[in-house]
């Protein structure tokens, strides 16, 4: 493009860098143009640095300069402003080169109060770049800023605002967050001041939202959308977009204002907006920002506003078809930036089929555009369109172009987008084609994205499998093509599915048997093969080509090349063979007895060999058959692969799959493997999959090859432990009322798991902190807080002093034990406060510890007669608490029972004359006293309501238990 | 926008602007990683790439790479034009800008950027308005310049 070409013009007038030689006249080595005030000393210094031949020379020159500056700053002679500015600027330069600077801050702060603009400006720049948490300085800096903000000199005010925005620290927020809204909406503020104030406030709000209280000014900020000055509007929209996300109601009038502003811009001629027109595109930045703002809200309800907006969106789509007004890439970029943002808004609304299909067609054109950037963005944007029911079919029509992109794009990031889009557009109709294309791509795919492609193929194959032989073939192909990238989740999953579906077991056995014939096959293939033949080898044993001895020798031929984990698995296969095929018993016992097994240096292998050998010798055939029985079906739960992909890509990555509304049939056919919200669970790759835990003691549990997954392991029995971003802390807390183990908290960085046990008035809680990132957490310090006088009611403390401020490595998990003692009845739980630094930024969170009064319940069995007698004894009105509420979950008697038991009370049968009702009793144990509790829960299935009644000997306890329990159904 | 980096073809950092709080160590790590990633890319490749949970938008002008990190929801193309507008501003101010101008007048490059972008958001898109603010500052200092200084000055 011409403009860029202009920048590449040879520059004759500029002195060649080669002219800058040490010792040459200083004036000659400076650039020919020095704008504003040239600081000659600075230019000389920069030249010197550039002339340094080595890193050492550079450091030497810098040290010399630092010494010089230090002596000037310390010297007796007072420095004039110019010198101070020059030296501060040199220090800044040195810092920006990557060296540490530990002095000069005071001189920079002095510059702030200079009344010479450039001195002040350099002072502010230094402060912005090198903020120091020295509190004394912060106070001085804030003072200078305060003076400049009050100066009524717009240039000074802007400098001060820029500084606050650049630093954005909490201290500055505390000092100025209250003033800036006033400056922003003051009638007499200059436009430039308003602009800076808006963005300054935005930065402070992002850093510490609590410091920026909404108020009377918010309404006036919204009206800045009507401001005559386009720059003011541009700055204000960013602020409003950020504020309205947390306070949508306070700002909802911005929708109609934004629509009318947008409409005026979109319909203006290409030169109407003068300097705000960019390469014949009117106000592209403002347009994009307005479209972003609108994406914070649902479609406008007011018909007139909505009509005007739809008109705007149509105009943008129409303009995309008009011939360009300029050939410059800036013109098309600006125009298309608006177009893509418009399409994002259309997708966000997801309610206008006509617009969605038009958007899709437009993106379709871009898929074949000669600009790589546009192809990339079209692929990316189409991914979201694919998940809309209105445009899914339209997206699918581009399948050939996308497959072609996967094959021919030269840029890996574009190919990755193509793979993402294929994944998003996949459904039953095109699954076979897409999976086979992705498999083909895998053979040449870049290493960086192979694992992701493997996961995607595995998920699609499972999700859209009509016959499971295709699924098995696909996974085995995956292992063949990219065995190294097939994670445990993938091969565990194929085993789960084969185990659960008897129609595919014979085929799977035959296929792995064939795959194992290959002279060099991947170790993952040996694992899958070993497991499947151990379970289902009998299904192909009738064929002499795969008779039991042949199966065994095939597997055993791979044994010596495999890792310990795989060999351990194969030993389990062998003992299963002894049960399946008695004729192999002698051979296998021979193998187990061999010195290389019985005296293996690896404890796990040795133990298995010893135990299996003994088991096979002492157990009768019947016992052996029971112990080594085929694995029972696995409980249905979310595909562990899907969970892994979500972890890799963050929440929403699996959306194309979760979104089954456009493909309702999938529930029927693949229902068994469909994730359903109620059974979502963290996968448990090492706990039960290899199955020997079902066997009695002789069989040791297999060595978990994914030993890093401890956290996952711990929670395998907790169906509420959601992968990805879990429920809100409050929801998570409530889930713990009826259970003791699970995930208490999870975000992008951190997972906190809990395992706890209670007895009488004592409890012990294990807290597991998992660092989900690859970066170390510093100063990781969890503490327990007992607000108010809670400590007189309940004690929660680390048994030994908790080590303060530990580092937690990326991917690592640390564990803590907490001892709990209930002294008296209590209503509010203690708090867990966790602080640490992640990438330098302090993080803190406070959670309720899942310790509620019912944890100290001791169930009490009693006969109907006793129950009614006690019930009557507790008949004072304040002893009873009752709640009638709507069912929030399906009304299932078994689930209800489990919850009541989890709550801690005994369940008493044959007490209530109505068998649908539940009656329970228990005693809450505290150190000071015991509280007897009786409860009754009456479901009404027709009305989908419950009535819950609690009677206890202590009034607040009745109410509290009633509230806790009512939230569980 | 989370940050903007300017670096040369040799990987020398010429300007860095951070709009999110990060430690110096983390900044250096990010810079090293990104400079390496971007320099390794071939000329015809697309200007966007995914990096950690951010999107990187970059463009090369002569010997300098301009590289911005934006968030997931941000618009890549308009970011590309943010870069271009910044280049235009530098060009107009220095008169056909080159890398040397940015090295020797780095403070000006920062001042211009602050007028254009603040807190990671576009503050003023009008070229006239941005340059007016900067030149006013230059004038302010020219007229009040210090007595007795004999710096060589080249007129504009």
Image (cartoon, rainbow, N blue to C red):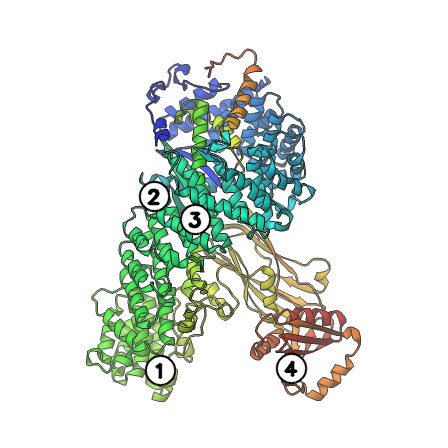
User: Which residue shows up at 45% across the image and 70% down it?
Assistant: A637
Q: What's the CA distance linking mark 3 and mark 1? A: 51 Å
Q: Quadrant of residue A541?
A: bottom left
Image vertical order of residue A890 relative to residue B115, above or below: below
Query: Is there one chain holding both mark 4 and mark 2?
Result: yes
Q: Secondary structure at mark 3?
A: loop
Residue A105 seen in render = yes
Query: Is there one chain holding both mark 3 and mark 1?
Result: no
**Closer to the camera, A373 or A66?**
A373
Q: Residues within 10 Å of mark 3 (few under 14, many from 20)?
A: few
In front of the other: label 2 or label 3? Answer: 2
Q: Secondary structure at mark 2?
A: helix
Q: Quadrant of the N terminus of chain A?
A: top left
In primary-sequence order, the first of circles 1 and 2 is 2
User: Which residue shows up at 43% across the image and 35% down it?
Assistant: B83
Q: Which residue is mark 3?
A: B52
Q: Chain under label 3?
A: B
Q: Chain under label 2?
A: A
Query: Is there one chain holding both mark 1 and mark 4?
Result: yes
Q: Secondary structure at mark 1?
A: helix
Q: What's the CA distance linking mark 4 and mark 3? A: 54 Å
In primary-sequence order, the first of circles 4 and 2 is 2
- Label ID, residue A372: 2
Q: Which residue is mark 1?
A: A615
In front of the other: label 4 or label 2? Answer: 2
Outermost residue, right side: A876
Image vertical order of residue A461 relative to residue A201, above or below: below
Residue A300 on image: x %, y %: 57, 51
Q: Which residue is mark 4?
A: A917
Residue B99 on image: x %, y %: 39, 27
């Amino acid at each position: 493009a011409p403009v860029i070409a202009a920048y590449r013009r040879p520059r004759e007038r500029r002195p060649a860098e080669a002219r800058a030689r040490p010792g040459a006249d200083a004036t000659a080595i400076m650039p020919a143009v020095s704008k504003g005030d040239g600081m000659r000393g600075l230019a000389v210094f920069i030249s010197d640095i550039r002339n340094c031949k080595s890193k050492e020379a550079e450091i030497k020159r810098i040290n010399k300069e630092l010494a010089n500056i230090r002596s000037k700053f310390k010297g007796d002679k007072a420095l004039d402003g110019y010198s101070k500015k020059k030296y501060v600027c040199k220090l800044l330069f040195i810092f920006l080169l990557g060296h540490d600077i530990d002095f000069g801050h005071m001189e920079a702060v002095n510059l702030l109060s200079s009344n010479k603009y450039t001195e002040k400006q350099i002072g502010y720049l230094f402060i912005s770049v090198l903020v120091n948490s020295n509190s004394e300085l912060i106070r001085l800096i804030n003072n200078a800023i305060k003076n400049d903000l009050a100066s009524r000199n717009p240039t000074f005010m802007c400098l001060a605002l820029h500084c606050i925005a650049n630093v954005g620290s909490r201290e500055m927020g505390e000092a100025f967050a209250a003033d800036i809204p006033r400056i922003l909406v003051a009638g007499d503020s200059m436009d430039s001041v308003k602009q800076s104030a808006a963005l300054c406030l935005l930065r402070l709000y992002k850093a510490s939202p609590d410091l920026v209280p909404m108020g009377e000014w918010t309404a006036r900020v919204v009206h800045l959308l009507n401001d005559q000055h386009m720059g003011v509007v541009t700055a204000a929209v960013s602020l409003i977009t950020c504020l309205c996300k947390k306070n949508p109601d306070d700002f909802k009038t911005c929708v109609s204002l934004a629509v009318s502003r947008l409409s005026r811009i979109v319909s203006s001629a290409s030169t109407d907006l003068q300097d705000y027109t960019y390469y014949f595109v009117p106000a592209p930045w403002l347009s994009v920002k307005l479209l972003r703002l609108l994406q914070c809200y649902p479609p406008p309800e007011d018909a007139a506003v909505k009509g005007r907006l739809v008109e705007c969106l149509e105009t943008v789509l129409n303009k995309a078809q008009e011939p360009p007004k300029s050939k410059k890439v800036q013109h098309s970029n600006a125009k298309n930036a608006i177009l893509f943002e418009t399409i994002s808004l259309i997708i966000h609304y997801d309610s206008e089929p006509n617009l969605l299909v038009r958007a899709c067609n437009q993106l379709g054109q871009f898929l074949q555009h000669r600009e790589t950037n546009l192809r990339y963005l079209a692929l990316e944007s189409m991914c979201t369109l694919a998940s809309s029911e209105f445009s899914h079919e339209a997206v699918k029509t581009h399948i050939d172009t996308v497959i072609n992109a996967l094959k021919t794009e030269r840029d890996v990031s574009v190919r990755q987008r193509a793979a993402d889009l294929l994944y998003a557009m996949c459904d039953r109709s095109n699954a076979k084609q897409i999976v086979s294309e992705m498999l083909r791509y895998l053979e040449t795919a870049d290493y960086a994205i192979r694992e992701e492609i493997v996961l995607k193929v595995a998920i699609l194959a499972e999700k859209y499998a009509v016959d499971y032989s295709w699924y098995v073939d696909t996974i085995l192909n995956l292992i063949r093509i990219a065995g190294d990238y097939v994670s445990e989740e993938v091969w565990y999953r194929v085993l789960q599915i084969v185990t659960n579906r008897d129609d595919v077991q014979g085929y799977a056995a035959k296929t792995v048997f064939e795959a194992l014939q290959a002279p060099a096959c991947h170790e993952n293939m040996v694992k899958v093969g070993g497991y499947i033949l151990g379970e289902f080898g009998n299904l192909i044993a009738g064929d002499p080509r795969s008779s039991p001895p042949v199966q065994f020798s095939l597997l055993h031929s791979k044994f010596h090349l495999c890792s310990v984990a795989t060999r351990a698995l194969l030993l389990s296969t062998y003992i299963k063979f002894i049960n399946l095929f008695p004729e192999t018993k002698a051979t296998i016992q021979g193998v187990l007895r061999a010195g290389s097994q019985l005296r293996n240096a690896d404890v796990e292998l040795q133990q298995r060999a010893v135990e299996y050998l003994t088991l096979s010798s002492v157990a009768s055939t019947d016992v052996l058959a029971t112990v080594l029985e085929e694995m029972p079906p696995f409980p249905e739960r979310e595909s562990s692969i899907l969970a892994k992909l979500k972890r890799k890509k963050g929440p929403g990555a699996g959306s194309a799959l979760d979104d089954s509304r456009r493909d309702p049939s999938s529930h029927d056919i693949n229902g068994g493997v469909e994730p359903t919200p109620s059974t979502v669970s963290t996968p448990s790759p090492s706990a039960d999959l290899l199955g020997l835990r079902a066997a009695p003691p002789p069989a040791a549990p297999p060595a978990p090859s994914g030993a890093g997954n401890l956290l996952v392991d711990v929670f395998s029995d907790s169906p509420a432990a959601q992968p990805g971003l879990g429920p809100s802390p409050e929801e998570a807390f409530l889930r713990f009322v009826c259970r003791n183990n699970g995930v208490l908290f999870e975000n992008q960085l951190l997972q906190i798991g809990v395992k706890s046990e209670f007895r009488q008035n004592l409890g012990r809680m294990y807290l597991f902190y998992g660092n989900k990132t690859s970066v170390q957490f510093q100063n990781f310090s969890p503490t327990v807080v007992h607000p108010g006088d809670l400590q007189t009611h309940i004690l929660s403390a680390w048994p030994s002093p908790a080590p303060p401020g530990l580092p937690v490595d990326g991917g690592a998990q640390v564990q803590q034990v907490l001892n709990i003692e209930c002294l008296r009845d209590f209503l509010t739980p203690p708090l867990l406060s966790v602080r640490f630094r992640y990438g330098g930024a302090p993080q803190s969170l406070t959670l309720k510890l899942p310790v509620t009064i019912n944890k100290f319940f001791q169930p009490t069995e009693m006969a109907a007669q006793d129950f009614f007698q006690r019930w009557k004894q507790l008949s004072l009105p304040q002893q009873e608490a009752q709640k009638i509420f709507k069912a929030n979950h399906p009304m299932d008697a078994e689930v209800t029972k489990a919850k009541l038991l989890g709550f801690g009370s005994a369940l008493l049968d044959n007490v209530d004359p109505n068998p649908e009702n539940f009656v329970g009793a228990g005693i809450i144990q505290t150190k000071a006293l015991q509280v007897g509790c009786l409860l009754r829960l009456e479901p009404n299935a027709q009305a989908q309501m419950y009535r819950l009644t609690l009677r206890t000997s202590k009034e607040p306890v009745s109410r509290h238990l009633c509230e806790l329990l009512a939230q569980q159904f | 926008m989370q940050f903007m980096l300017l670096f040369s073809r040799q990987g020398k950092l010429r300007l860095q602007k951070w709009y999110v709080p990060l430690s110096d160590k983390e900044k250096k790590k990010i810079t090293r990683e990104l400079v390496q990633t971007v320099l390794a890319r071939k000329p015809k490749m697309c200007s966007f790439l995914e990096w950690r949970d951010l999107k990187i938008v970059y463009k090369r002008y002569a010997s300098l790479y301009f590289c911005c990190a934006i968030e997931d929801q941000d618009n890549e193309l308009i970011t590309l034009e943010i870069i271009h507008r910044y280049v235009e501003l530098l060009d107009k101010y220095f008169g056909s800008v080159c890398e040397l101008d940015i090295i020797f007048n780095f403070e000006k490059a920062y001042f211009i950027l602050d007028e254009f972008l603040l807190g990671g958001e576009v503050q003023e898109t009008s070229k006239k308005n941005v340059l007016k603010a900067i030149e006013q500052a230059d004038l302010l200092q020219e007229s009040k310049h210090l007595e007795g200084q004999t710096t060589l000055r080249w007129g504009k």
